[in-house]
Image (tube, helix red, strand yellow):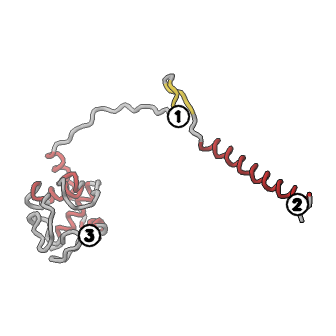
């Protein structure tokens, strides 16, 4: 049934397969094995990447009055048409039609409106502890970092970091009644 050549082929196949696996393991070990380095005379695993330290001065604290002045300057130059483009991500959760709540409350007439007064929306109550009326300045601080400005808010949005983009958005919202 089996002759010598068939047995030799089978054993050779197993040996070849074993050799392929051994070579693969050796190659993988050489690629993925954590390299050993020495840092300050101590053995550490991994690579040490030397990075030149930048000289940084003290971080300047900006007062709230300065931030408001910067915003008012940006708001004076705001473009409501650009704000309409900024509103597109907001439209996933907010409507511009009065009384039409979604995940968030409707934003028609939000500029100048008292906080937590959108009819039919269940607010978390966090906003009332921080602000009374949605002035452009309060909206600016809120839109920049909602959870940082009003801890406990249920609004799950990272915020808009660009000052002019926020000013454009608020100018657009001011046109919607």
Residue linked to disc 3: 93
**x, y (%) of residue 32?**
59, 44
Residue that badge 2 annotates: 6
Which residue sits at x=7%, y=59%? 132
Give the residue drawn at x 83%, y 58%.
Answer: 10
**Who comes first in sequence, dot 1 or dot 3?**
1
Viewer-closest of 105 and 19: 19
Estimate how packed mark 1 is, as few (under 14), some (14 to 19) or many (20 or more) residues with alpha carbons within 10 Å: few
Secondary structure type for disc 3: loop
Q: Is residue 7 left or right of residue 160?
A: right
| Element type at mark 2 | helix
Q: Nearer the viewer, mark 2 or mark 3?
A: 2
Which quarter of the figure is the C terminus placed in?
A: bottom left
Q: Secondary structure at mark 1?
A: strand
Give the x, y percent position of residue 147. Answer: 22, 54
Q: Is residue 63 above or below residue 152?
A: above
Q: Quadrant of the N terminus?
A: bottom right
Q: Earlier in the sequence, mark 1 or mark 2?
A: 2
Residue 117, numbered circle: none
Cα separation between marks 2 and 3: 71 Å
Q: Number of labelled discs?
A: 3
Q: Earlier in the sequence, mark 2 or mark 3?
A: 2
- Which residue does the numbered mark 1 point to in the structure image? 45
Location of residue 60 by image quarter = top left
Q: Nearer the viewer, residue 139 or 13?
A: 13
Report if the CB atoms under discs 2 and 3 are less than 8 Å apart: no
Q: Which residue is more in the foreground, 3 or 87?
A: 3
25 with respect to 113 (left or right): right
Q: Mark 1 or 2, which is nearer the eye?
A: 2
What is the distance, in whole Å, between disc 1 and disc 3 at their CAs? 47 Å
Establish if 133 lies above or below 24: below
């Amino acid at each position: 049934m089996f002759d010598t050549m068939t047995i030799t082929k089978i054993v050779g196949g197993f040996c070849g397969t074993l050799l392929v696996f051994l070579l693969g393991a050796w190659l993988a070990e050489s690629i993925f094995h954590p390299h050993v380095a020495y840092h300050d005379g101590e053995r550490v695993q991994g690579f040490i990447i030397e990075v030149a330290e930048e000289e940084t001065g003290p971080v300047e604290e900006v007062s709230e009055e300065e931030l408001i002045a910067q915003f008012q300057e940006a708001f004076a130059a705001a473009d409501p048409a650009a704000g309409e483009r900024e509103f597109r991500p907001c439209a996933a959760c907010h409507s511009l039609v009065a009384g039409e709540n979604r995940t968030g409350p409707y934003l028609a007439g939000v500029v100048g409106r008292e906080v937590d007064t959108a009819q039919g929306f269940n607010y978390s109550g966090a906003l009332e502890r921080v602000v009374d009326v949605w002035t452009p300045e309060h909206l600016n601080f809120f839109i920049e970092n909602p959870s940082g400005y009003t801890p406990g808010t249920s609004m799950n949005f990272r915020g808009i970091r660009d000052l002019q983009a926020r000013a454009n958005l608020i100018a657009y919202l001011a046109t919607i009644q």
